[in-house]
Image (tube, grey):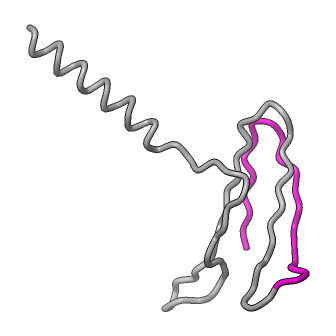
Amino acid sequence: MKKAVVATFMVMAIGLWAQVALAGFSGTDLFLPSVGAKPGVAPAIWYTTVYVHNPNPTAANVTFYLLERQANPSPMSYTDTIQPGDTAKYDN
């Protein structure tokens, strides 16, 4: 009986740990080293999709900057507002 209780506890602990381990990245600055859309070996097409989730109770403003090679004194940018609890999907 004691072994069954210990085994059950271990399974529950591993299950709780796995949920924490699968948590998303949070931060104020995030860099994507490579994004784009290009054809691959037919019929493949490579593209980037970015999901941004706002878990906060207030709206969040997000800004994307296209930082190309070399100096970027005035990079192209895109700004959006994500409502509380929403997830926005951005395809390129």
Above or below for 43 versus 56:
below
Residue 91 on image: x %, y %: 72, 68
On screen, residue 32 versus residue 74, left or right, reads: left
Residue 69 appears in which quarter of the rendering? bottom right
Residue visible at 38% across and 34% down?
17
The residue under the point 17% across, 17% down is: 6
Relative to the observer, which residue lies in front, 36 or 62?
62
Measured as percent of width and height from the top left, residue 62 is found at 82, 55
Of all residues, the one furthest to the top in this rendering is 1
Q: Is residue 71 above or below residue 19?
A: below
Residue 36, quarter of the rendered image: bottom right
Residue pictured at 9% horizontal, 15% vertical? 3
Q: Residue at x 17, y 21 (%)?
A: 7
Name the image quarter holding the C terminus: bottom right
The relative height of residue 1 versus residue 66 in the rendered view (above or below) is above
Residue 77 covered by magenta stretch: yes
Give yes or no for residue 47 being in the magenta stretch.
no
Residue stretch in magenta:
72-92
Quarter that holds the N terminus: top left
- Residue 5 placement (x, y as % from top left): 17, 12
Decide if residue 18 is on the left or right side of residue 22.
left
